[in-house]
Amino acid sequence: MKSPMTGVGVNQKREDKATSDSSPDSSFFQTPLYFRNLVEVSPYGFCVVDKNRNILYLNQTGRDICGNNLFNAASEKDKAVIEAAWQRIVLHPEQPVSFRYRIKDTLEEELWIEAIGKNMLSDAAIHAIVMQFRTSTNYIQSPEEEGGLAVKFSQLFNAGIIGIFVSKFDGTFIEANDAFLSLIGYTREELKQGKVQRDILTPPEYQPVSEEAVAKLQEGGKATTYEKVYLHKNGHPIPVLIAVSRIEGTEDVCVGFVLDISERKNIEKRKDQFLNLVSHELKTPLTSMILFLQMLEHYVQRNKHHEYHVLLEKMKNQMGKMIALINNLLDVSKLQSHELPFTMKNFPIAQAVSEVVSVVSHMTVTHTITIRGKTDAIVYGDKERIEQVLVNVLLNAIKFSPAANKVIVSYRVHGKYISITIQDFGIGIDKKDQKKIFERFYRVETDSNATYPGFGLGLYIAEQIVKKHGGSLTVKSTKGKGSLFSLSLPTV
Ligand code: ADP
């Protein structure tokens, strides 16, 4: 801008005001004055400039926004944007050119201006450049940023680091990058022909996972992350981690990012095989050691070496702990490979509960375990495995309530299910940990973790056993107050 506006608009407005106070007759609507008044009160800034950027007219809104300095108020960062826009306006008569830039308002706050300019120099009646503009206090992406983001996204799309697809909720893939296509073994032509369909790519056991993800997108459109398996065109399974998000402004289209996690799954498998091997290798010598220990016990008793009795008891105790741990590790690897055997038969659940309570009561001197109520419910299942679950939950109840002295076991009937609830008054479990405690190796982080020995396997095994019986193991807990575990089983 070479000079400030001439002030034509301001003076003219004052002159016209008296006229506009009285009701005009219909011919007034045709007058230039009428239109000038209209422009003057427009909520948009309106400006007429000559080819040297002298402002010939600026309406009231325009003056409110930027004083008389429509261009000069632009922040240093955006001077180049204005120059480029001006060139485009001058070089392309009659074509509207949109641009946006930042200015400092009278309070030195940064404001965004969205402007549109049109070169009307060749229009004999106007012979000027006409601009409209408005402010926005919201953040507006600058053109460089916008361009930059698009470029960055297309780089990501083509980089081949991660599979990316765009699909409809009904399962039709609309677009995909090369990384995704090569992962699933399909060609771009097959994609275009509609041959890439979620149902074809998803093995039956993973259909519910996909359906759940779509349902979540339909509800909130928010991104969800989940693991599943895709079937390669040649039939082999590929474990993947997927993050999907509904594309804003669409009803049923989402973008998905797919990471091949085959390598991670292989490592996990090798780790499981290693654990299985180690547990077997440890169990064999331990079994012989227990045999020798029993022989030693007989020898000590026969020869009345009672001074060794306490030591042998301690050894037996420690070995018992080692066996329990190794058995847990073996159970985990058998569960992983679906090889944990179950001997199913009908049995009264109350009998299992009272046997377990009696055994565990002998293992504690600090807590009293009380059974409240009765049940004659019959359960079809592996009694020993169900007892293993009960022992685990009961020992946890004692272990994690060091300041309490009781645990309460009770029964509840829900339709065809019997629930055994085990309530303690201990340290409790934070809401965020309550789901995770059933995961393998998960232990809640506490300041005094060392106080509570364990490996985070018990509840994982317990839940898996209960699920195999068609039941559930759940927890309700309040941190600092205690926990209530419910073991629900279908009755006969
Ligand atoms: P472990 O007891 O060997 O660590 P579990 O799988 O039995 O493994 O339990 C996992 C975790 O759940 C425990 O480490 C503990 O943090 C939490 N937990 C289990 N039972 C209770 C309970 N009754 N009260 C408080 N925390 C518990």
Image (spheres, rainbow, N blue to C red):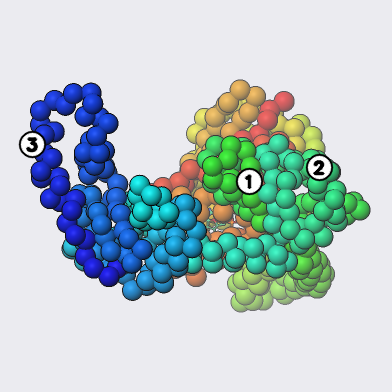
Q: Amino acid at mark 1?
A: Cys
In the picture, the disc for residue 194 is 2
In the picture, the disc for residue 18 is 3
Number of callouts: 3
* Rendered position, 9 above or below 215: below
Q: Position of residue 369 (x, y in %)?
A: 50, 45
Comes first in the chain, label 1 or label 2 = 2
Q: Name the residue tied to disc 1.
A: 254
Mark 3 vs ligand 1: CB under 8 Å? no
Q: Secondary structure at mark 3?
A: helix
Q: Amino acid at mark 2?
A: Gly
Residue drawn at the location 76% of the way across and 62% of the way down: 179
* Rendered position, 146 above or below 34: below
Q: Quadrant of the C terminus?
A: top right
Q: Secondary structure at mark 2?
A: loop
Residue drawn at the location 71% of the way across and 36% of the way down: 170
Which residue is at the front of the view, 247 or 139?
A: 139
* Rendered position, 71 above or below 127: below
Can you tell which of label 1 and label 2 is closer to the viewer? 2
Outermost residue, left side = 18
Q: Quadrant of residue 334?
A: bottom right
Q: Quadrant of residue 108?
A: bottom left
